[in-house]
Image (spheres, helix red, strand yellow):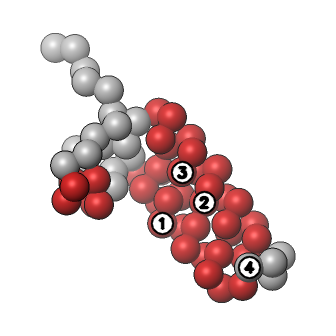
Amino acid sequence: MKSNVGGIDRILRIVAGLVLIALALTGTIGLWGWIGLVPLGTALFGFCPLYTVLGLNTCPMKKA
């Protein structure tokens, strides 16, 4: 797995995931909030399978 999730993208995914999970825990949005595990997981691993399928990459190029 090659990293394809960049810094700002990771931060936004972590925030969105945590907010959704918190809303699920408080009962505000019900079980659908647990979908927040997906953006949280992709942010923590730095890899998004959907980005691979779509040919996207927000990770900055590394200088050789």
- Residue to which mark 4 is pinned: 29
* Residue 21 point in image, percent of width and height: 68, 68
43 left or right of 20 in image: left
Mark 4 neighbour class, 10 Å CA radius: few under 14, some 14 to 19, many 20 or more: some
Numbered tag placed on residue 54 in the rendering: none
As helix, strand or loop, the secondary structure at mark 4 comes to: loop
Cα distance in 3D space between marks 1 and 4: 16 Å
- Residue to which mark 1 is pinned: 38
Which of pointers 2 and 1 lies earlier in the amino acid sequence?
A: 2
Cα distance in 3D space between marks 3 and 1: 9 Å
In the image, residue 27 sits, relative to residue 3, either above or below, namely below
Residue at 74%, 79% in the rendered image: 29
In the image, residue 19 sits, relative to residue 56, either above or below, namely below
- Hey, what amino acid is under mark 2? Gly
* Residue 57 point in image, percent of width and height: 28, 40
- Taking the image as drawn, is residue 3 in sight? no
Of badges 3 and 4, the one in the foreground is 4
Cα distance in 3D space between marks 2 and 4: 13 Å
Of badges 2 and 4, the one in the foreground is 4
Q: Residue furthest top?
A: 64
As helix, strand or loop, the secondary structure at mark 3 comes to: helix
- Hey, what amino acid is under mark 1? Val
Numbered tag placed on residue 13 in the rendering: 3
- Residue to which mark 2 is pinned: 17
Q: Do callouts 2 and 1 mark residues in contact (Cβ within 8 Å)?
A: yes
Cα distance in 3D space between marks 2 and 1: 7 Å
Residue at 50%, 59% in the rendered image: 39
Classify the position of the C terminus by image quarter. Answer: top left
- Taking the image as drawn, is residue 13 in sight? yes
Q: Do callouts 2 and 3 mark residues in contact (Cβ within 8 Å)?
A: yes
58 or 45, which is in the foreground? 58
* Residue 12 point in image, percent of width and height: 57, 45
